[in-house]
Amino acid sequence: MAGVSTGEEVAARVQNSCFVCGADNPRGLQIRFRTTGDGLVEAEWTPPSEVEGYQGIVHGGVVAAVLDEAMSKAVAATGSPALTAHLEVRYRRPVPSGACHRIEGEVTRRDLRRLHVRGALLDADGHAFAESKACFVRKV
């Protein structure tokens, strides 16, 4: 399967108005994901106050969307078109707005039609704010 080269940006394909990664969405987060040499897809993100659910804390639904997008980019980097079938998020601690965080996604296992993926939203020291796992089903 053809994938994405190391260091290459993994961008929205047809849907460039995606809420999380779409460059053409002025109200979106416009997060830019890149591949790494070790199979990860990662990005840096400084959440603005507009995505808070409580003062100074990013809304949990936005955190879930960001993690889903990181995992979908990891799947896209493998060259396998697939959609989220199941998503689980474990919130470990509140995500502060206004600070730079690291987002990562990685395919952990592939079956015939399924890709199992993990994601994480981390602080500067690598400690998790939230972790996720998902199952993506390949399009047929």
Image (cartoon, rainbow, N blue to C red):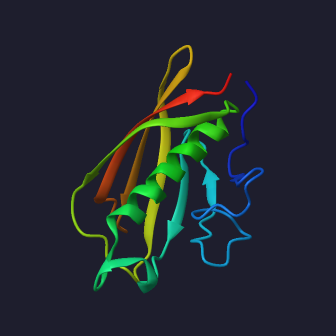
Among the 4 quarters of the image, the one containing residue 78: top right
Question: Residue at coordinates 33% horizontally, 64% vertically from top-left?
Answer: 60
Quadrant housing the C terminus: top right
Instruction: Point out the residue furthest to the left here.
Output: 93
Q: Position of residue 55 (x, y in %)?
A: 28, 86
User: For this rendering, which residue is in front, 52 or 100?
Assistant: 52
Question: Residue at coordinates 57% horizontally, 42% vertically from top-left?
Answer: 74
Q: Where is residue 49 in the image (x, y as percent from the top left)?
A: 41, 85
Residue 108, compared with residue 132, is above or below; it is: above
Question: Residue at coordinates 45% horizontally, 63% vertically from top-left?
Answer: 102
User: For this rendering, which residue is in front, 70 or 25?
Assistant: 25
Residue 55, compared with residue 28, is above or below; it is: below
Q: Position of residue 19 (x, y in %)?
A: 59, 65
Query: With 77 as the anchor, is 126 left or right in this view?
Result: left
Question: Residue at coordinates 29% horizontally, 57% vertically from top-left?
Answer: 128
Query: With 4 as the anchor, is 31 left or right in this view?
Result: left
Among the 4 quarters of the image, the one containing residue 24: bottom right
Instruction: Point out the residue furthest to the top here.
Output: 112
User: For this rendering, which residue is in front, 17 or 120?
Assistant: 17
Quadrant housing the N terminus: top right
Q: How many marks?
A: 0
Q: Where is residue 114 in the image (x, y as percent from the top left)?
A: 52, 23
